[in-house]
Image: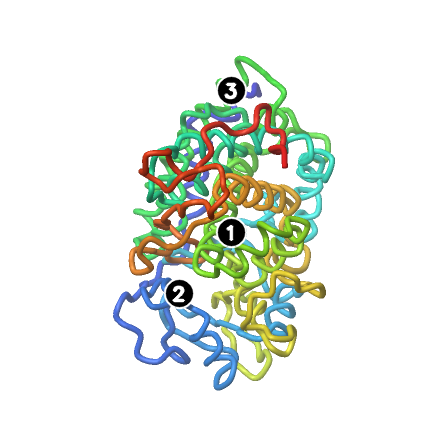
Amino acid sequence: MTVDDRFGQGMEERRRSRLLGKASAAVTDPVADWATDFSHVDPAWAADPYPILDDLRQRCPIARTERFGGVWLPTRYEDVAAVAYDTERFSSRAVIVSTNRPPREVAPSGDAPPITSDPPFHRDARQLLLPMFTRSAVAGREAATRAYCHELIDALRGREVVDAALDYAQHIPVRVIADMLGFPPEDGPKFRSFVADVLEGVDQSPEERLARQDVLVGYLVTQIHEHVARPRDDLTTYLVDAELHGRKLDPEHVVGTMMLLLLAGVDTTWSAIGASLWHLARTPADRERLVAEPRLMPTAVEEFLRAYAPVTMARLVKQDMRWSGVDMRADDWVLLSFPAANRDPAQFERADEVLIDREANRHAAFGLGVHRCAGSHLARMELRVALEVWLERVPGFTLADPAAVTWSTGQVRGPRALPVRILPDPPGGDASPPGGSGGDAIPPDGPKGGAPAAA
């Protein structure tokens, strides 16, 4: 069988037949009681989930809802960790709570990417990706990432109010992942629509969700065929040529891994960048301290990841059981709220405060257990560089309209709209107030070649 045969029409038909499983209703009515009827797609959850999680941790640490066919929500760090490490009783064959539960045979079949596979196959699928995400591999992408961040800020010149999410944060991981996969950089707007279709449309019918995914899969298959015709040194060609156990990867494995990288690698990181900029815009003391003490940036990055962890993953219960005082049924969803775990006062001192100089910080933003994020080095680099360049070029900024900030719904939370006002430099600075006779607050030219600006 040739590579083209592997990625033919039959692949898509097999994929659809395998992924359509047991359907359930989303239930979009307003929440009556967060302990017994929570909804992670409720507008109140999207706007600010932390008071809800804090309340549940006190009075109902493992909440339950019948929405989506039944979902559990542990809110204590110890419970979240226990589920994450327990691959015997909880399956990762579906990690997005939606109206569709894929059949049980999906993960063990040996053609799933690491995020949706269970041991023992999971280890091999994960090992295949690790060489691309080592510290040294990621370090090789830093200069290009830094240069691109400067390009984005150059494009904001002359504007007093900018959208730090739409005009900055959302572009950075799109460019990095597109470069890694060898996709056209001008396809960035498509990637953003893919994220919204796949990660935020969880209350649609299974057929509707698969139809939206089909658009993404069609794009990925087109890219695969272009790489087969013209191989190049990128991650797509690597996956097409890769072998496990003496044979080429199944086409669903290749497409699923590319989908994972495109969605998880983009949405999680731009959400983390956006949330960090939101914090700095509304917390001038932290912003001014980071500008004055840039050596604190690595520590601040870890604290932003802890306090504003963007990701909540899901597991499926393998069989009926009594677990931590509750009766779980086979195929119940379990939401692993890493944001809740990271705000647990039993695990972190002053858990509800953002301390940019916090030293002891073993947070769970990248997950726990065998499924801990393989791309954590890449995400950290992108977040750190994005913040370093922004603060270097835009040291003064504040929320233009706090009420205009909007957050995504679903299992990845980050700002979707983040209007900020660029402040004039203090007396003695090089720039005049935005829109004034002396120009705007962004210096006219960024550093060349991605090098840090001279002090």
Tell me the residue that label 1 is attached to. Answer: 272
| Label drawn at residue 40 | 2
Q: Position of residue 167 (x, y in %)?
A: 39, 39
Colour pattern of the rendering: rainbow
- Left or right position of 101 against 356: left
Establish if 419 lies above or below 254: below
* Residue found at x 66% / y 51%: 298
Q: Earlier in the sequence, mark 2 or mark 3?
A: 3
State if disc 3 and disc 2 touch (CB < 8 Å). no
- Disc 1/disc 3 C-alpha distance (Å): 38 Å
Q: Earlier in the sequence, mark 1 or mark 3?
A: 3
Q: Is residue 112 visible?
A: no
Location of the N terminus by quadrant is: top right
Q: Nearer the viewer, residue 406 or 117?
A: 406
Q: Secondary structure at mark 3?
A: helix
Q: Is residue 97 visible?
A: yes
Amino acid carrying mark 2 in the image: His
Tag nearer the camera, 2 or 1 = 1
| Label drawn at residue 237 | none
Q: Position of residue 344 (x, y in %)?
A: 58, 74
Q: Nearer the viewer, residue 6 or 419?
A: 419
Q: Secondary structure at mark 1?
A: helix
| Label drawn at residue 4 | 3
- Disc 2/disc 1 C-alpha distance (Å): 18 Å
